Structures are given as structure tokens and as C-alpha cells.
Amino acid sequence: MTQAERLTFLIEYLISENKELKSFHIPVEENARKRLLRSLMNIRPPKPVTKDFLNIQDEYLQGEKTEKGIISLADIPFVKSGIYLWQGDITRLSVDAIVNAANNAMLGCFVPCHGCIDNAIHSAAGIELRLECSRIMEKQKIEEPTGKAKITKAYNLPCRYVLHTVGPIIYGEVTQKDCNLLSDCYRSCLELAAEYQLKSIAFCCISTGEFHFPNEEAAEIAIQTVKDYQKKNPSDMEVIFNVFKDCDYKIYKQLLG
């Protein structure tokens, strides 16, 4: 099967699951078809799927991963003891764990092709990630508390695990409680990574963007929390601050010296 044939199979399978999409017209242009597949994956609820679908999905996403290119820790500039800074797509990082800024439902983003990191990570990992998150939430029976963290497999991502944490949502002025909860997110992820004996963890800019935490203040909290943790818990765990926007790169570069 070629990548184009896998793409067609996956689209047709997902459309066949949804009666409302039976007469949906599949575009001819490749990028439009890729966006359609991502959209169909995004809106799919966590429900059983055939082994054939998973096998072909995994082959397709592995091919996409190779095409995007994989970034290892050796490719990332070293900043200071145990800390790295890298600007780019977090789904390309081949580290022990990447951090996902999730929401309280912890099932990924259901908005087709949304620009949030939650959507990007679930789209690159494949539908198994939502299925695993669903099993965790069914067992938990309550929404994921803000400031805590959960760990899952990474599936078709180049990392080994995904750490999911829910940051505070800012509606007005940033409060001390908001700052404490954001710090809890970083600390919870570090503690969970240590529990699983992970040696490298890449943090996204938790709670910025869709959750409206001011970027500079969020970066200050992130860096200070990591430094405090490293001081209290000396280890060989490497921490990567992953940024996507130019403004965040400038902030982190200045704060890290």
C-alpha cells in the first residue's frame, strides 16, 4: 500500500462510521485530503475500531513522522545544566516524554484541525491515544483536576510517553492561585517522569495560547519551577523547553540567559 492508498482507506473507513457523512465528497488534492483525515480523526469519539484500521493508520502516521523529520536531544542546543531550549513542532521530538496541555475532559481536542497543541499531539499519535485517555477517565470517573498529570503511551509519536496536564484558564487578572496551579503542572509532570525513571522531558508552554496565561509570566513560572525541582531532586533528567512562536522563543532565551 502506498501512502496515498493508506490515506484513502483511512478517510473512507472514518466516513463509513458516520451516517451523517455518507454522501461527503472526498477532495482530490493531497493536502485537502490530509486535512480531511485529521478532521475525521479529531471528531471521532473514543469507540472500538478494527485492527486493520489501526495497522494502516500506524503505517500511514509512521510515514508522515519520517517525512516531517525527527529531532533528538543531540540536535537541541544546550542552555545550562540539565536545561535545553528548542523552537519547533513538539510532535517531532524523540525524547522520553513530551508534555501535552490538555483540558479537564482529557480526551484531546475535538475541533477539526484546531491549532492547539492538544490537537497536534493527538493527531500525530493516532486514535489509540484518545482511546487510552478514555479508559483512564472512565476509571477515574471525574474530570482531570487542574495542576495534576497523567501518563500515556505515545503510539506514533517519536517520543516514548505523553504526559498530560491541565493548566489554569485565565479569564481576567492572573491570581496567585493561577500561578500556583501552573507551577503544579510542571511539578506534577516532573514527579511523574521521575516515577517512571524517564531521562528527558519536553515541556510545551502550558496554559498560554487558548488558556490565555500571559506568556512571559508563564515562562518565569515554568523556569523557576523546573530549577527549584532540579535543586531539590538532583538527577540526570534533561528538561527541554519547547516553544513554537517566535515571541516565546525570545522570552525563554532572555530568561534562561
Image (cartoon, rainbow, N blue to C red):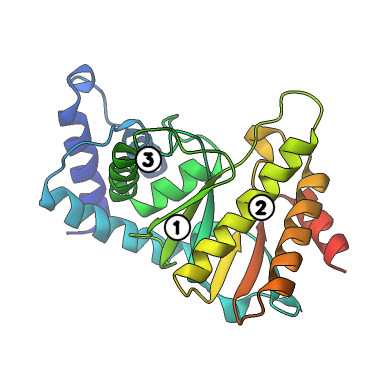
The alpha-carbon separation of the residues under discs 3 and 1 comes to: 19 Å
Q: Position of residue 11 (x, y in %)?
A: 24, 38
Mark 1 near mark 2, Cβ–Cβ under 8 Å?
Answer: no
Q: Is residue 94 left or right of residue 79?
A: left
Q: Is residue 209 left or right of residue 163?
A: right
User: Across the whole image, how many numbered discs are drawn on residues?
Assistant: 3
Tell me if residue 70 can be seen. Answer: no
> Measuring 74% from the left and 74% from the top, which residue is drawn there?
231
Give residue 162's mark: 1
Mark 3 near mark 1, Cβ–Cβ under 8 Å?
Answer: no
The alpha-carbon separation of the residues under discs 1 and 2 comes to: 18 Å
**Nearer the camera: disc 1 or disc 2:** 1
> Measuring 39% from the left and 38% from the top, which residue is drawn there?
107
Name above or below for residue 240 compared with residue 225.
below
The three-letter amino acid code for the residue at tag 1 is Val
Say few, some or many: other residues with alpha carbon within 10 Å of mark 2 (under 14 / 14 to 19 / 20 or more).
Answer: some
> Measuring 40% from the left and 46% from the top, which residue is drawn there?
123
Q: Which residue is mark 2?
A: 244
Which comes sooner in the sequence, label 2 or label 3? 3
Of 9 and 195, which appears nearest the observer?
A: 195
Name above or below for residue 171 compared with residue 192.
above
Name above or below for residue 92 compared with residue 17.
below
Tell me if residue 64 can be seen. Answer: yes
Judged from the image, the secondary structure of the residue bearing numbered disc 1 is strand
Say few, some or many: other residues with alpha carbon within 10 Å of mark 3 (under 14 / 14 to 19 / 20 or more).
Answer: many
Give residue 38's mark: 3
